[in-house]
């Protein structure tokens, strides 16, 4: 027993020596490893695409053919009629609400964050440091943990069941991560540049307006996409803070539609696809930017 | 700042304060001392919710981390088709959780769903299950759907992490005769440590507080088998109007979430922005 235990480190230690035997492989050759990788990756692709394909196909059915035709094959009567059904059921309203909410939240978040980041970086005082630390704590607090008092607060402020309540709370929720990303960006802007502008008679405001804002455009775009996606898809805040159909945003609206059309699967699928359409357009137009935004925000 | 203070910081303190009151949301709150907390300690439902939540957290991490890492390393490769795959992999990220839940509800329907249709045409009996109504499998279905939703995001993180590893490290290791397996264990994995910490923290805290899919698809059922802590809290507050007791659950969620996040960050020496930069440089 002890024999095998002691022999193990020796074996692993000798591995580099044994490894010198095979010559460095040319890249891009179809080695067994690459074939396995290809097969597994394709399997995952099927897992990702198949449900979406199913949903697209189902949305082109009528309620009757969905139940009778094979749902995986594009045969047996395809129609756009259920798309009309969901627009008649108020999807357009939810869409407009979502667009308004998302745009307002992005504008509020970005303008606030850029200003706050600049102040935090420029002022090394205790207040700025403390503010920054509280923001970090906000980053760690899950929204679910504060949803109850948040609801009561919104209720007391007479904002319950308004889009305005969603604008304020979602902006507040987006602020910690956005400020953090902005701070780490603004911090990397060379101090000499700021100093030079100040020496040339610039004020803090002109520095901010003519140096920080133009330089920050790529980060602002990244944050706009990231925060925008989160606002567009957020479910729990609209669920808790709104109630009427007139202020429902898409994610909540979808579940309302499902309540109305529980047995009409094609209509529900059509609604889901319409709700994701703006994002798909955005993704097709600026795929690289979207993928970079998603990752880079949390990787900082 | 004021906005953040009012809508994030005030509720944080509010949750803690409320957890010591008994309140139905309408009348005046009554001081309850530790009664809510004692109720929590003796509530079998809360224990059930804790168990379910712990399962979701552990299984989510175990399922999502290796798959995400493998996909991330795969898509970081230079072949053309891999970037096409990478673009398609991102698609679930565009769907809202509500959309994902409704889509899978249609697929998993035991009578008219896509999987049942598939089981009929391919003669694969096991695809025909009562996916969302069978107490012994539904929780795992939910965990699988959460993975379906979030693996693309974490794969993206690993892809970026892999691309940041300097190529020289691989060149040097290859010159020293390292095998592909050794390249992975000795170069890739250690170099990805920050990515692993970031991704794991997000997976763990995210699944700890997970709410949307469970609420829409099962509402905690069948029985209480998928009733997670966040759902327990939601129902206590907004269906039973037990705001004090719900706040206890909220505080537990918040403290555990923050604790795990800071614990992971501290444990891995991933303290501040500066230290991350040093690690890379």
Image: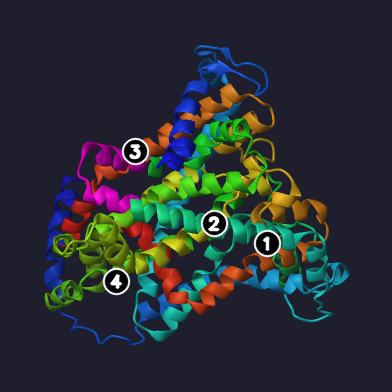
User: Is residue A131 part of the magenta span, yes or no?
Assistant: yes
Residue A95: image tag: 1
Residue A134: image tag: 3
Same chain shared by disc 1 and disc 2: yes
Q: Find residue A290 and report its image quarter.
A: bottom left
Chain bearing tag 3 is A
Residue extent of the magenta highlight:
A116-137
For mark 4, give the secondary structure: helix
Residue B163: image tag: 4
Return the residue nearer the eye: A20 or A141: A141
Q: Is residue B22 above or below residue A106?
A: above
| Residue B160 location (% of width, % of height) | 33, 67
Proximity of marks 3 and 1: CB atoms separated by less than 8 Å: no
Residue A104: image tag: 2
Cα separation, mark 3 vs mark 1, equals 35 Å
For mark 1, give the secondary structure: helix
Residue B80: image tag: none
Pick whichever of labels 3 and 1 is earlier in the sequence. Answer: 1
Label 4 packing within 10 angstroms: few (<14), some (14-19), many (20+): some
Chain bearing tag 1 is A
Q: Is residue A175 above or below residue A99?
A: above
Chain bearing tag 2 is A
Label 3 packing within 10 angstroms: few (<14), some (14-19), many (20+): some
Same chain shared by disc 3 and disc 4: no
Chain bearing tag 4 is B
């Amino acid at each position: 027993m002890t024999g095998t235990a002691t022999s193990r480190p020796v074996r692993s230690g000798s591995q580099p020596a044994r490894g010198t035997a095979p010559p460095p492989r040319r890249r891009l050759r179809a080695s067994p490893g690459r074939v396995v990788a290809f097969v597994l990756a394709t399997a995952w692709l099927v897992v990702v695409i198949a449900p979406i394909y199913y949903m697209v196909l189902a949305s082109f059915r009528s309620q009757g053919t969905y139940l009778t035709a094979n749902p995986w094959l594009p045969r047996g009567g395809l129609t756009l009629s259920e798309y009309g059904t969901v627009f008649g059921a108020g999807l357009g309203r939810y869409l407009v609400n979502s667009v308004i909410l998302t745009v307002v939240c992005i504008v509020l978040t970005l303008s606030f964050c850029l200003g706050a980041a600049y102040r935090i970086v420029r002022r090394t005082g205790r207040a700025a440091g403390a503010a920054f630390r509280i923001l970090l704590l906000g980053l760690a607090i899950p929204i679910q943990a504060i949803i109850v008092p948040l609801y009561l607060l919104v209720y007391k402020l007479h904002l319950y069941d308004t889009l305005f309540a969603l604008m304020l709370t979602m902006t507040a929720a987006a602020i910690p991560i956005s400020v953090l990303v902005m701070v780490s960006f603004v911090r990397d802007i060379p101090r000499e540049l700021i100093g030079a502008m100040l020496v040339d008679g610039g004020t803090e405001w002109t520095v901010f307006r003519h140096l920080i804002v133009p330089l920050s455009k790529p980060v602002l775009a990244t944050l706009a996409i990231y925060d925008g996606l989160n606002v567009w898809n957020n479910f729990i805040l609209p669920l808790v803070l709104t109630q009427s159909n007139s202020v429902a945003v898409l994610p909540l609206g979808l579940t309302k539609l499902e309540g109305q059309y529980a047995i009409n699967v094609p209509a529900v699928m059509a609604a889901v696809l319409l709700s994701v359409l703006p994002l798909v357009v955005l993704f097709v137009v600026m795929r690289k930017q979207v993928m970079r935004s998603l990752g880079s925000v949390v990787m900082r | 700042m004021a906005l953040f203070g009012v809508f994030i910081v005030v509720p944080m303190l509010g949750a803690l304060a409320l957890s010591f009151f008994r309140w139905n949301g309408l009348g005046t709150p009554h001081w309850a001392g530790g009664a809510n907390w004692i109720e929590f300690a003796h509530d079998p439902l809360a224990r059930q919710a804790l168990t379910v939540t712990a399962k979701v957290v552990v299984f989510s991490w175990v399922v999502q981390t290796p798959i995400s890492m493998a996909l991330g390393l795969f898509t970081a490769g230079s072949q053309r088709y891999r970037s096409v795959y990478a673009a398609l992999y991102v698609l679930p990220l565009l769907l809202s959780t509500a959309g994902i839940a409704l889509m899978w509800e249609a697929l998993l329907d035991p009578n008219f769903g896509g999987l049942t249709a598939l089981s009929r045409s391919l003669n694969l009996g096991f695809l025909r299950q009562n996916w969302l109504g069978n107490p012994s499998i539904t929780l795992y279905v939910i965990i699988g759907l959460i993975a379906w939703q979030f693996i693309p995001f974490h794969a993206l993180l690993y892809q970026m992490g892999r691309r940041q590893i300097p190529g020289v490290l691989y060149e040097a290791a290859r010159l020293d005769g390292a095998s592909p397996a050794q390249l992975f264990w000795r170069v890739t994995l250690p170099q990805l440590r920050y990515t692993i910490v970031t991704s794991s923290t997000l997976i763990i805290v995210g699944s700890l507080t997970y709410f949307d899919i469970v609420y829409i698809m099962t509402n905690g059922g069948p029985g209480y088998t998928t009733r997670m802590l966040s759902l327990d809290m939601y129902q206590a507050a907004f269906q039973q109007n037990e705001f004090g007791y719900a706040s206890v659950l909220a505080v537990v969620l918040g403290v555990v979430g923050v604790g795990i996040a800071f614990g992971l960050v501290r444990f891995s020496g991933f303290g501040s922005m500066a230290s991350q930069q040093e690690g890379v440089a």
